[in-house]
Amino acid sequence: MNITQEFLSIAPKVFGNNVEISFEKNLPLILSKTGSVIKIKDHRDNFVICSDFSSPNNVYQLYSLYKKQCDFTYLYLFKGFESIHKEEYRKLIKAHANTINSYGDIITSGNRINGLEYMFGDSNQKIYPYTKKTQLVLKFYLFNKKQPYTVREIANKINISPASVTRANETLFHLGALTRNGVGAGTEYILKSKREVLKQLKNDFIKPFESNSLILINKNEKELDNLLLSGQSAVAEYTDLNISSNVPTTYALEKKQFDSFFANQSNKEFDDNSKIICVQSYLYDPIIFSNNKCIDMFDTYLTMLFDEDLSDPRVHSAFKEIERKLLNE
């Protein structure tokens, strides 16, 4: 069985049976022998690149070419890939590439960084990657009055270095989210309209959490009083969208705190009064811009954007309500 056939045999597991499958033609001549590109059409277009990785650089260029056109582009990692191509596997992990393994699992980091595009793009072109620190700086502008701020003001609020704020400002400027005036130390950045930013950066936003974990906890656990509601639980607080009674309450914890919390609960003994909760491991501290007992409005917006079925009229209505509140409309 060749690599393309291997993927096609598991495609229904990945995308379901009710899809249209076709092969992309007219690939750039230099990349035409790299492998096959399969188009999977369900409620959106998906592209899967199947290759033996005999020419990795060509694979990465092909991936970058399609990723620029469609974020739902994946590299298929055939059976045994991790052991046959150890170095390339490390590169893919480091670059946060979208992949599908031979078990049918989709591995993606949302729209974190298209690292392969930067690795194999024009080496003379300055790179402005959108990272979690960029997103934190963007949140500062979203939740504060529209005016210029010093690097130090932003750094102190979100607890990152001034150098990181400077890089984030440059990234947001080049992505079209900020206007820039002045030069050198006198440079000022101001957020453009929030609506324009949400539309313009939609494909750059990062999913704010890495994972969801179900955890058993005692009902009288006071530690829950200090946790922020997130996920569907936060959506229910901000909107009229009700969640099912059998869905566990969801909370947010920054990754290091999550690891400690998870380890602490694993060592406890539980009685008949214990309950199941869901805890999300956040990329950054969700408390920084939190609203009372909930994660902030932007992280709630992103949670719905990445995880909810917005084709559902009730969910879409709640999403638009969150958006209006975020835009202060």
Image (spheres, helix red, strand yellow):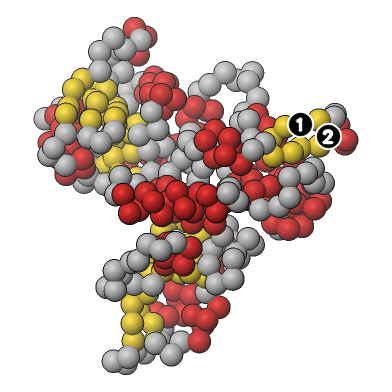
In the image, which disc is placed on residue 180?
1
Q: Quadrant of residue 35?
A: top left
Residue 10 as seen in the image, left or right of residue 173: left
Upstream in the sequence, badge 2 or badge 1?
Answer: 1
Viewer-nearest residue: 293 or 131: 293
Dot 1 alpha-carbon crowd within 10 angstroms: few under 14, some 14 to 19, many 20 or more: some
- Is residue 113 rendered to the left or right of residue 250? right
Instruction: State the count of labels.
Output: 2
Residue at the image position 36 percent from the left and 90 percent from the top: 269
- Residue drawn at x 58%, y 43% is 131
Q: Residue at x 85, y 29 (%)?
A: 183
Compared with 33, 298 (above or below) is below
Residue 180 lies left or right of residue 261; in this view the side is right
Give percent across and percent down for residue 222: 50, 87
Give the structural element (helix, strand or loop) at label 2.
Answer: loop
Q: Vertically, is 141 above or below 188?
A: below
Q: Label 1 is placed on what type of residue?
A: Arg
**Residue 323 spot, x, y in % from top left:** 50, 49
Measured Cα–Cα span from mark 2 to mark 1? 7 Å
| Near-viewer residue (105 or 253) | 253
- Three-letter amino acid code at disc 2? Thr
Mark 1 falls on what kind of element?
Answer: strand
Provide residue 196's location: percent of width, then percent of height: 58, 35
Q: Circle 2 is placed at which residue position?
A: 187
Labelled pair 2, 1 in contact (Cβ < 8 Å): yes
